[in-house]
C-alpha cells in the first residue's frame, strides 16, 4: 500500500526546497501539485508550482468530489486532487503532499495512516531573515507572514515528526531518513545497517522525542505580537 507523507511549515521555513531535494534522491515518490484559483506569481508556471484554474472549474471539481481536501483563503481556493493519490497507488509509489495545517488536518481525518511532518525554522529571527532575503514581499506582508507563522507552529504537536531546518544538507538527510524509515517499517524486513541509521535519525524527530528542542523555538515567536493581523490562516504558496 502506498504511503502518504504530509509536509507542512510556516512560509519561509524552506519546505519547498526540502521537498524538491527529497524528490531528487528518493525513488518511487510522487508529488501532488495543488489546484488554486489565484493567479500565477512571478515565474510560476501552470502544472509546476500549481494547477491554476478558474473558480468555475474549481467549484465543478468540488461538486464532482475530486478533492481530498480544499479550502478558501483570502478569496482564493486551494485544493489537493484525489487523482494524485489514485495515480500513486496504481504505480505503487508513495505520495508527498506539500500542504498547510488546514489541509493537513483534513487529510489526517480521511487518511489517519498518513505520515505527517512539520518543518520549523530554528527561531523567529532566522525566519524573518529568510523571508526578507527572498525579496518577494513588502514589509507589511512579511510582518503578516511572521505573525501567521506564530499561529501555525502552535499546531506542531498534531504532527508525527518535527524537523528543525537549520542546515539544509542535514535537514535533507533527516527528511530522507524519515521517509526511508517509514518504508522500512512497512516492509517488515529486518533493517540493514543503513536502514538502522535511518530509523535512529527519524526517531530523534518523533514528536515525543523533540518536544524539548521545540520549546525555545516557540518562545522566540511568543513576543512577535502583531494582533492586528487577525486569526485567518496564511495563504498557501507563501
Image (cartoon, rainbow, N blue to C red):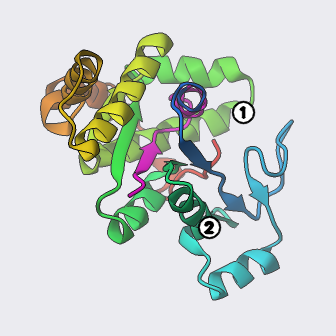
- When asked about the image quadrant of residue 72, the answer is bottom right
Q: Quadrant of the C terminus?
A: top right
**Residue that sits furthest to the bottom in the current view:** 63
Q: Tag 1 or tag 2, which sits nearer the N-term?
A: 2
Residue 7 shown in magenta: yes
Relative to the observer, which residue lies in front, 91 or 126?
91
Whole-angstrom CA distance, mark 2 to mark 1, is 33 Å
- Mark identifier at residue 83: 2
Q: Are marks 2 and 1 in contact (CB under 8 Å)?
A: no
- Mark identifier at residue 225: none
The percent coordinates of residue 111 (x first, y second) are 36, 65
- Residue displayed at 29% across by 47% down: 159
- Residue displayed at 38% across by 35% down: 179
Mark 1 = which residue? 137
The percent coordinates of residue 210 (x first, y second) are 19, 28
Left/right of residue 231 with respect to residue 198 in the rendered view: right
Relative to the observer, which residue lies in front, 88 or 51?
88
- Residue displayed at 65% across by 56% down: 34
Q: Secondary structure at mark 2?
A: helix
The percent coordinates of residue 128 (x first, y second) are 53, 23
Numbered range of the magenta stretch: 1-21
| Vertical position of residue 76 compared to residue 213: above or below | below
Left/right of residue 100 with respect to residue 212 in the rendered view: right
Amino acid at each position: 500500500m502506498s504511503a502518504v507523507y504530509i509536509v507542512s511549515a510556516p512560509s519561509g521555513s524552506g519546505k519547498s526546497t526540502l521537498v524538491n531535494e527529497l524528490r531528487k534522491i528518493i525513488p518511487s515518490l510522487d508529488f501532488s501539485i495543488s489546484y488554486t484559483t489565484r493567479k500565477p506569481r512571478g515565474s510560476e508556471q501552470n502544472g509546476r508550482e500549481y494547477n491554476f484554474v478558474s473558480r468555475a472549474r474549481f467549484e465543478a471539481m468540488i461538486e464532482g468530489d475530486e478533492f481530498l481536501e480544499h479550502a478558501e483563503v483570502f478569496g482564493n481556493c486551494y485544493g489537493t486532487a484525489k487523482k494524485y493519490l489514485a495515480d500513486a497507488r496504481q504505480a505503487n509509489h508513495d505520495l508527498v503532499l506539500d500542504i498547510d495545517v488546514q489541509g493537513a488536518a483534513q487529510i489526517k481525518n480521511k487518511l489517519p495512516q498518513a505520515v505527517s511532518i512539520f518543518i520549523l525554522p530554528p527561531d523567529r529571527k532566522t525566519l524573518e531573515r529568510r523571508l526578507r532575503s527572498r525579496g518577494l514581499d513588502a514589509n507589511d506582508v512579511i510582518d503578516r507572514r511572521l505573525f501567521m507563522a506564530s499561529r501555525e507552529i502552535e499546531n506542531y504537536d498534531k504532527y508525527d515528526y518535527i524537523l528543525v531546518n537549520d542546515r539544509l544538507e542535514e535537514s535533507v538527510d533527516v527528511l530522507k531518513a524519515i521517509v526511508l524509515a517509514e518504508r522500512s517499517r512497512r516492509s517488515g524486513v529486518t533493517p540493514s545497517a543503513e536502514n538502522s541509521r535511518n530509523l535512529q535519525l527519524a526517531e530523534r524527530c518523533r514528536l515525543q522525542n523533540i518536544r524539548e528542542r521545540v520549546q525555545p523555538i516557540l518562545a522566540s515567536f511568543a513576543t512577535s505580537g502583531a494582533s492586528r493581523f487577525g486569526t485567518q490562516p496564511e495563504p498557501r504558496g507563501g
